[in-house]
Image: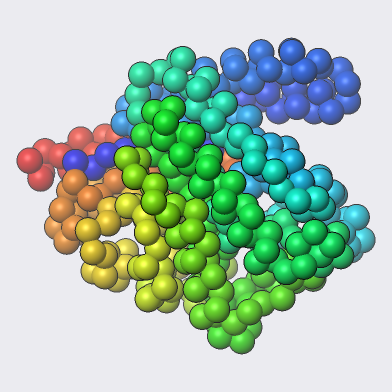
């Protein structure tokens, strides 16, 4: 009951951030960087164990960002600085109040089947005996983030062509992870979560930015929702014997026209996505009411975001209990997991204090203990 986990990333120790910088300047060798990556992974895994989490990740320590790292792992992508795609790109980001990684993985050649995260799982299994979750970017997210109207069109005439190729690679990677003993594969889908902010004819702010920088065009609300659904289902088709979840988040601004509207806006398409668990941000203000979403579930689990990753205040256990117990009465305590809203450090330079992240996880685990007693 009330399984505890993280969404994915955990704040990186300063020595690792410095090592990445030194490696890019030629001051650190590949072998030295690998040793520091292993040290950082050990540190984060042990911190998650000390916090008391049931299902852990490696904190995504090897990833420079939660999505563009695929450009380093899959042949066919090329890293391009955002200002090369559009000279005034940083002004566009500021104007739209959007954060994107500056180094963009852009599809410039046909994608080739490649290991994405199997190596991360294999190393983590040597340092922990707890259940391990591996996070992977979803096809819909990768399509929006990596297709470029000028640089990709020669190999992928339409963004959907790229997405379908990536979905095939993703499915093969999920099967490799399953065979290697992963407990949970989570597909990250913030672009679908952000669709809550869009209308039928007008895109949300993230798509507006990508339209301006990458040249991809908004298809309309329903068409986007159907496309996201179909691509995830293609990636997980026929996969059995492993828990698969999908994470959606959104950080609505207070001036958002859909502030307070939840993921139920994505009905019915989101309910047709063939995953065991929906991992959803709900502690963040303006994210809506989780009961609205949970009432429509048909046997799936919900990993409920119960602590914020943008606010440094450490939530009290009883506060977390009050967020989760109503949902547990509706779904049953076995179908409710407790997680943070999102990763604590989805990008390498996101400076969320590691000590605060640890304290939030400790409080969340304490809340799970209270809830287990209440529902036992």
State which quarter of the image contains the C terminus.
Answer: top left
Q: Where 366 falls versus 125 (above or below)?
A: below
> Seen in the image, is 274 located left or right of residue 42?
left
Residue 340 drawn at (x, y percent): 42, 45
Residue at 60% across / 37% down in the picture? 116
> Seen in the image, is 20 located left or right of residue 182?
right
Q: Where 74 falls versus 99 (above or below)?
A: above
Residue at 17% across / 48% down in the picture? 333
Residue placed most toward the observer, 160 or 262: 160
Q: How is the image coloured?
A: rainbow
Q: Where 260 falls versus 39 (above or below)?
A: below
State which quarter of the image contains the N terminus.
Answer: top left
> Seen in the image, is 101 located left or right of residue 190?
right
Residue at 59% across / 82% down in the picture? 220
Residue 247 drawn at (x, y percent): 45, 53
Q: Where 12 falls versus 200 (above or below)?
A: above
Residue 23 lies in quadrant: top right
Residue 131 lies in quadrant: top left
Residue 125 lies in quadrant: top left
Asked whether residue 94 appears in the rendered view, the answer is no
Residue 358 drawn at (x, y percent): 44, 31
Asked whether residue 165 appears in the rendered view, the answer is yes
Residue 106 drawn at (x, y percent): 78, 52
**Residue extending farthest bottom:** 201
Count of picture labels: 0
Residue placed most toward the observer, 304 or 158: 158
Residue at 74% across / 41% down in the picture? 75
């Amino acid at each position: 009951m009330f399984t505890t986990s993280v969404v994915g990333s955990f704040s990186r120790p300063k020595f690792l951030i410095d090592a990445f910088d030194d490696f890019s300047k030629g001051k650190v060798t590949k072998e030295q960087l690998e040793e520091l990556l292993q040290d950082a992974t050990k540190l984060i895994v042990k911190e998650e164990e000390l916090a008391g989490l049931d299902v852990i990740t490696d904190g995504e320590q090897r990833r420079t960002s939660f999505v563009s790292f695929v450009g380093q792992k899959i042949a066919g992508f090329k890293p391009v600085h955002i200002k090369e795609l559009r000279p005034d790109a940083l002004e566009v980001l500021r104007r739209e109040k959007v954060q994107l990684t500056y180094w963009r993985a852009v599809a410039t050649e046909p994608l080739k089947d490649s290991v994405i995260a199997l190596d991360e799982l294999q190393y983590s299994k040597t340092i922990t005996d707890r259940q391990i979750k591996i996070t992977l970017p979803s096809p819909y997210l990768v399509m929006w983030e990596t297709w470029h109207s000028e640089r990709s069109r020669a190999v992928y005439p339409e963004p959907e062509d790229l997405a379908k190729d990536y979905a095939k690679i993703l499915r093969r990677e999920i099967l490799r992870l399953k065979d290697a003993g992963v407990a949970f594969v989570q597909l990250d889908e913030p672009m679908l979560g952000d669709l809550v902010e869009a209308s039928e004819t007008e895109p949300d702010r993230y798509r507006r930015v990508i339209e301006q920088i990458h040249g991809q065009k908004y298809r309309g609300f329903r068409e986007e929702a159907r496309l996201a659904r179909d691509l995830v289902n293609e990636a997980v088709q026929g996969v059995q014997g492993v828990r698969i979840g999908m994470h959606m988040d959104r950080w609505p601004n207070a001036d958002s026209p859909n502030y307070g509207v939840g993921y139920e806006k994505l009905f019915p398409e989101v309910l047709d996505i063939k995953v065991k668990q929906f991992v959803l941000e709900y502690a963040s203000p303006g994210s809506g009411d989780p009961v609205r979403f949970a009432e429509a579930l048909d046997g799936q689990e919900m990993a409920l975001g119960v602590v914020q990753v943008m606010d440094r205040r450490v939530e009290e256990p009883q506060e977390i209990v009050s967020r989760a117990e109503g949902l547990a009465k509706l779904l049953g305590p076995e179908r409710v997991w407790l997680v943070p809203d999102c990763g604590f450090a989805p990008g390498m330079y996101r400076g969320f204090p590691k000590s605060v992240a640890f304290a939030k996880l400790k409080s969340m685990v304490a809340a799970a203990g209270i809830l287990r007693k209440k529902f036992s």
